[in-house]
Image: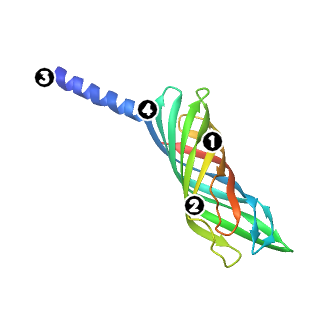
Amino acid sequence: MKKIILAAVLFIATSATIQAQLLKIGVKAGVNFANQTGDAAFDGISVDKEGITSYHAGLVAEVKLLEKFSIQPELLYSTQGATYKSAGEEFKNELGYLSIPVMAKFYLSKSFSLELGPQASFLLSERNDFDVKNGETFEFGLNAGLGFKITESIFVQGRYGLGLTEASKDADVKNSVFQLSAGFMF
């Protein structure tokens, strides 16, 4: 009887250890260097675009499937957009998204990883210096970047995201963002 109980305890402990190694959950936050690509013309007037600096923050998970391959789903709040200039006037368009990237993570070494994957984003807020709410409510894009594990728990990432669908109902523009992140896995 003692051997059965000991075997059950060892089995549960081993299963918990294996499970902990296969799935990690954490948080991340960082800075966005965002802009919008494409032709921006509002009411037939051409405007110049400049990037904005904003932020992103949220939850991250890593599911280890193979020795050097993981899937990393994320749930982030991310602000993107651009500053527009025309005839001496300047206005800022900042879009707040709930972004869901799902990254395929290829480990090049024990610490470095290459990350590629799609991203679906849902518009939650739109803040601009003019009285127009013209943001599309859904955006689809692709991301690519690099990750580096400083320790088993602390990581940094650099990523470029390119929107494949238009971000505005009134202009032919797509979001483009470079993100620098730091995070902690529990």
Q: Are marks 2 and 3 in contact (CB under 8 Å)?
A: no
Q: Which of 136 and 8 is in front in this view?
A: 136
Q: Which residue lies furthest to the left in this view?
A: 1
Q: Nearer the viewer, residue 155 or 139?
A: 139
Q: Mark 1 points at which residue?
A: 156
Disc nearer the start of the sequence (2/3): 3
Whether residue 149 is visible, yes or no, is no
Q: How far apart are marks 2 and 3 (CA)?
A: 57 Å
Q: What residue type is labelled 2?
A: Tyr
Q: Mark 3 points at which residue?
A: 1
* Residue at the farthest bottom position: 131
The picture places residue 32, in percent across and down from the top left corner, at: 68, 54
Q: Which of marks 2 and 1 is in front?
A: 2
* Discs 3/1, front: 1
Between circles 4 and 2, the one closer to the viewer is 2
Q: Please provide percent x and percent y for residue 31.
A: 67, 53
Instruction: Give 116 or 6, whichever is nearer the viewer.
Output: 116
- Disc marking residue 97: 2
- Identified at 56% across, 50% down, the residue is 119
Residue type for callout 1: Val
Residue picked out by circle 4: 21
Residue 146 is left or right of residue 61, and the answer is right
How far from the left and from the top, in percent, is residue 179? 66, 49
Residue 183, percent from left and from top: 57, 45
**Disc 4 secondary structure class:** helix
Using residue 94 as the reference point, say whether residue 1 is left or right of it. left
Amino acid type, label 3: Met
**Which mark sits nearer the N-terminus, 4 or 2?**
4
- First along the sequence among labels 3 and 1: 3
